[in-house]
């Protein structure tokens, strides 16, 4: 999620606004992983995931006329700790650690 309107951009950079969202996610206590091209958040339900998205829009909506977001949801009942678990599974298959 990032602003696309000129009122919230410093040239091509949007990191000041993305940082606001990351701060909100970090303070939420939810497990997450920041990556160069997006952020992965682990929640227990779709409702909880959409609440994080809504809060992120609230964070940017205060100042930004237009905000872009792209969502992917991977729902697997009864599983937690998947951020680490998925990486561990691939590393076990390869028989070695990989960069992540």
Image: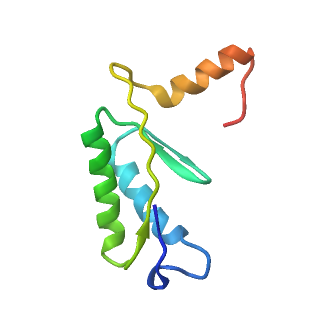
Residue 20 screen position, x and y as percent: 42, 64
Residue 3 screen position, x and y as percent: 46, 72
Residue 94 screen position, x and y as percent: 73, 17
- Number of numbered labels in the structure image: 0
Residue 59 lies, with reference to residue 34, above or below; the image says: below
Quarter that holds the C terminus: top right
Q: Residue furthest bottom?
A: 7
Color encoding of the figure: rainbow
Instruction: Using the rendered view, name the quadrant where residue 69 is placed.
Output: bottom left
Quarter that holds the N terminus: bottom left
Residue 79 lies, with reference to residue 72, above or below; the image says: above
* Residue 8 located left or right of residue 53: right
Instruction: Using the rendered view, name the quadrant where residue 99 is placed.
Output: top right
Q: At x 53% / y 27%, what residue is drawn? A: 84
Q: At x 36% / y 70%, what residue is drawn? A: 60
* Residue 53 located left or right of residue 89: left
Residue 42 lies, with reference to residue 27, above or below; the image says: above
* Residue 48 located left or right of residue 60: left
Residue 64 lies, with reference to residue 71, above or below; the image says: below
Residue 58 screen position, x and y as percent: 29, 65
Q: At x 67% / y 20%, what residue is drawn? A: 91
């Amino acid at each position: 999620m990032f602003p696309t309107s000129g009122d919230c951009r410093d040239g091509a950079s949007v990191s000041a606004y993305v940082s606001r969202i990351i701060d909100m996610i970090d303070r939420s206590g939810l497990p997450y992983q920041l990556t160069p091209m997006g952020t992965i958040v682990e929640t227990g339900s779709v409702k909880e995931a959409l609440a994080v998205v809504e809060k992120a829009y609230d964070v940017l909506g205060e100042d930004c006329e237009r905000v872009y977001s792209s969502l992917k949801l991977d729902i697997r009942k009864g599983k937690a700790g998947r951020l680490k678990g998925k990486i561990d599974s691939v590393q076990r298959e390869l028989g070695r650690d990989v960069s992540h």
